[in-house]
Each structure stands twice: as structure tokens, then as C-alpha cells.
Image (cartoon, rainbow, N blue to C red):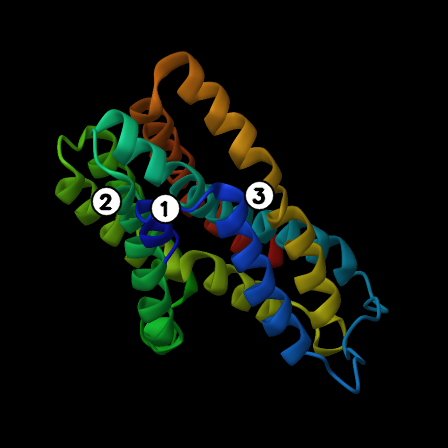
């Protein structure tokens, strides 16, 4: 929609005003009468130390997932328009392709988790997402970049949800919300680190190198997943 509005000559401020109105309306629709959260108490035994370590590694996995997702959301349109010389409509299709793919793939992610296990799913998702990032990095046309974003979206779709699930399963029932909240705190730093780090790499080496760095970051996910399981043991 943003790409079509830009193609029609709308100014960025007008597009953002429409987006703000839509987001505000949806936010009002999510209001809850009872906002209580169960499971925020600290574990009474010495498992708190293991919980901290497992939660930290889980949060780092989420951070990498959000960092790579943010790279596609923030830089894919610019990559298509500036590096691959696409028009605004083609540029807007980059983040749209990844977001749509991620949304559809996440519908089946939990079903896959029940069959293959969390560490295997995290490893496979990270490898697939990293491969997509590499395809984007070497793409020579917008169509090839779209293929990379689709592959990247399929892989990234399972990384953050699986990490959150694993953090919750590893925590005692009374501390699950606490553990997930900690992992979320660490993970959301990906949205702060992502734009600055990718902007720095893109400014010095170009957007191709920035997506290559996303692939390198995703390669750390299998290592953190195994460290997370070892911390619990």
C-alpha cells in the first residue's frame, strides 16, 4: 500500500499520517479490561542462575532474529531501488514479500516444533534465513531479491517464536512470564542495534555487505541454541 501511494505521488508525511491513523485504530481495538500477568515471580530455588543463563541465550537468539527481520524491513526497499535500480513500487514489494511469507510460515511453525524439536528448528530456520540473506546480497535483479526475501522470511519466521517457546518451557511454571519478559528485553535490542549497525555497514561497504552481515549473525543462532540447552542441564 505504501508503495502504491508513493507511486501515486503522495509525500512521505502523508503516507506516515495514514499509517499512524491505521495503527492507532488497531491499538484501540486491543484494549484489555484485565491486564494481569501470571508467572512473574522469581523461582524459590537455585534454578534462578540457570534460568538467567538460558534466558540470556534465548534473548540473544531473539535479538539476532529481530535484527535480521529489521534489516529486511528497513533496508530491502532501499536495496531494490538504489542497488538494483527498481522503482518505488518494486522497492515496496521487498519488505512486503518477506512480511507476508513470515506471517504464513509462522502459522505452521509450532506444528513443526512438535515434530523436530526446538534446537533443530532453530538451526534449520537460521540456516534458511541466512541463505536468503545471501541471495539478497548477491541479487542482480529485483526478482532475485524477492526470492531471497521469501527464503529469508520462511527461515526467520520460526526463529524468534521458537526461542520464546524454549525459554518458557525451560522456566518453572511460576516464572515463565518473568523468563519470557527477560528474553524479550534482550531481544528487542535488535531493533535498536539493527538500524545503526546496518546503516554503518551500508554506508561504508554498501547494502550488499549489510545483508551479508545479517547472514553471518544468523550463523550464531545454532551456537546460542545449544548453549541455552546446556545452561538448563
Residue extending furthest toward the bottom: 33
How many neighbours does mark 2 have within 10 angstroms: few (below 14), some (14-19), or many (20 or more)? some
Q: Nearer the viewer, residue 128 or 211?
A: 211
Task: Give the left or right position of residue 201, taking residue 151 as reference.
Answer: right
Closer to the chain start, of discs 1 and 3, is 1
Q: Residue at x 77, y 79 (%)?
A: 38
Q: Earlier in the sequence, mark 2 or mark 3?
A: 2
Seen as rendered, the residue at the extreme top is 204
Nearer to me, 213 or 231: 213
Residue labelled with disc 2: 90
* Mark pair 2, 3: CA separation: 25 Å
Q: Single out the mark in the foreground, 2 or 3.
A: 2
* Residue identifier under label 3: 191
| Residue at image point 72% right, 53% down | 52
Q: Is residue 54 left or right of residue 112?
A: right
2 and 3 marks in contact (CB < 8 Å): no
Distance, label 1 to label 2, CA atoms, is 11 Å
| Residue beneath disc 1 | 6
Query: Residue sitting at 36 percent across and 14 percent down?
Result: 205
Kindly state the secondary structure of the residue where label 1 is placed: helix
Query: Which part of the image, by quadrant, shows the C terminus?
Result: bottom right
Q: Position of residue 47 (x, y in %)?
A: 75, 62
Disc on res. 110? none
In terms of secondary structure, where does tag 3 sit? helix
Neighbourhood count class around disc 1 (C-alpha, 10 Å): few under 14, some 14–19, many 20 upward: some
Q: Is residue 227 visible?
A: no
Which of the two marks, 1 or 3, is nearer to us in this view? 1
Q: Secondary structure at mark 2?
A: helix
Please provide percent x and percent y for residue 78.
35, 33
> Residue 104: percent from the left, percent from the top?
32, 70
Amino acid at each position: 500500500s505504501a508503495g502504491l501511494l508513493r507511486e501515486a505521488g503522495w509525500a512521505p508525511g502523508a503516507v506516515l499520517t495514514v499509517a499512524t491513523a491505521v495503527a492507532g485504530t488497531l491499538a484501540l481495538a486491543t484494549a484489555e479490561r484485565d491486564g494481569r500477568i501470571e508467572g512473574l515471580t522469581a523461582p524459590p530455588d537455585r534454578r534462578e542462575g540457570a534460568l538467567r543463563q538460558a534466558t540470556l541465550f534465548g534473548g540473544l537468539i531473539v535479538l539476532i532474529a529481530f535484527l535480521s527481520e529489521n534489516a529486511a524491513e528497513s533496508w530491502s526497499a532501499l536495496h531494490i531501488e538504489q542497488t538494483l535500480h527498481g522503482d518505488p513500487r518494486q522497492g515496496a514489494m521487498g519488505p512486503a514479500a518477506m512480511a507476508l511469507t513470515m506471517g504464513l510460515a509462522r502459522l505452521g511453525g509450532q506444528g513443526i516444533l512438535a515434530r523436530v524439536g526446538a534446537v533443530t528448528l532453530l538451526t534449520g530456520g537460521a540456516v534458511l534465513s541466512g541463505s536468503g540473506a545471501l541471495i539478497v546480497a548477491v541479487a542482480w535483479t529485483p526478482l532475485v531479491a524477492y526470492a531471497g526475501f521469501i527464503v529469508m522470511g520462511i527461515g526467520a519466521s520460526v526463529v524468534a517464536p521458537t526461542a520464546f517457546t524454549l525459554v518458557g518451557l525451560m522456566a518453572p511454571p511460576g516464572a515463565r512470564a518473568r523468563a519470557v519478559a527477560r528474553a524479550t528485553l534482550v531481544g528487542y535490542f535488535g531493533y535498536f542495534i539493527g538500524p545503526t549497525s546496518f546503516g554503518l555497514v551500508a554506508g561504508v561497504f554498501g547494502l550488499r555487505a549489510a545483508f551479508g552481515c545479517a547472514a553471518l549473525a544468523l550463523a550464531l543462532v545454532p551456537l546460542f541454541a545449544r548453549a541455552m540447552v546446556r545452561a538448563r542441564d
